[in-house]
């Protein structure tokens, strides 16, 4: 395993929720990253953010690690969940709530419901 893949593997296994994104959770650098970070922030999820723009090896390595071509990428309990479209769909359907519940991830259930109401 390359150094980047080992770093990624260690990161996703050491943190309950990890978002590989362009920018940071407080300052996203692309619309897709902003959308996913916004959902997680609004729902009060504690997560580790990894700015792929800060390290080209991580930026390429995460695509190989997940076999997924785009960023952002969300991991929960070491498992790849998906990118922006998948996270959006899961949020609106309630699947993301279920994933968090199943994995013991704390989040604001009322905030999750407000997102769904606003998009109904």
Image (cartoon, rainbow, N blue to C red):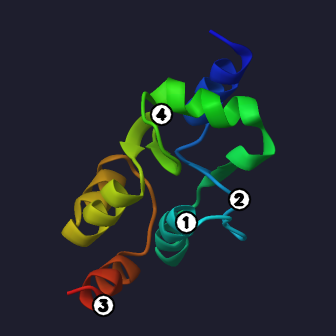
Quadrant containing the N terminus is: top right
Picture residue at 23% right of the left edge, 59% below the top: 95
Q: Are marks 2 and 1 in contact (CB under 8 Å)?
A: yes
Q: Marks 1/4: CA distance? A: 18 Å
Q: Are marks 4 and 2 in contact (CB under 8 Å)?
A: no
Q: Marks 3/2: CA distance? A: 26 Å
Picture residue at 46% right of the left edge, 62% below the top: 106
Picture residue at 65% right of the left edge, 52% below the top: 49
- According to the image, label 4 marks what residue? 78
Dot 3 or dot 2, earlier in sequence: 2
Label 4's element? Answer: loop
- Disc on res. 37: 1
Dot 3 or dot 1, earlier in sequence: 1
- According to the image, label 3 marks what residue? 118
Q: Marks 3/1: CA distance? A: 17 Å
Dot 1 or dot 4, earlier in sequence: 1
Q: Of tags 2 and 1, which is closer to the observer?
A: 2
- According to the image, label 2 marks what residue? 23
Label 1's element? Answer: helix
Label 2's element? Answer: loop
Image location of residue 55, percent across then percent down: 78, 38
């Amino acid at each position: 395993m390359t150094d980047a893949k080992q770093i990624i593997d260690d990161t996703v296994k050491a943190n309950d929720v990890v978002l590989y994104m362009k920018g940071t959770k407080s300052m996203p650098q692309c619309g897709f990253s902003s959308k996913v970070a916004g959902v997680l922030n609004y729902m009060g999820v504690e997560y580790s953010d990894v700015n792929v723009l800060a390290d080209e090896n991580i930026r390429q390595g995460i695509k190989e690690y997940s076999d997924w071509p785009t960023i952002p990428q969300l991991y929960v309990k070491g498992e790849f969940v998906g990118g922006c479209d998948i996270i959006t769909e899961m949020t609106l359907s309630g699947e993301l709530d279920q994933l968090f519940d199943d994995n013991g991830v704390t989040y604001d259930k009322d905030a999750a419901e407000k997102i769904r109401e606003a998009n109904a």
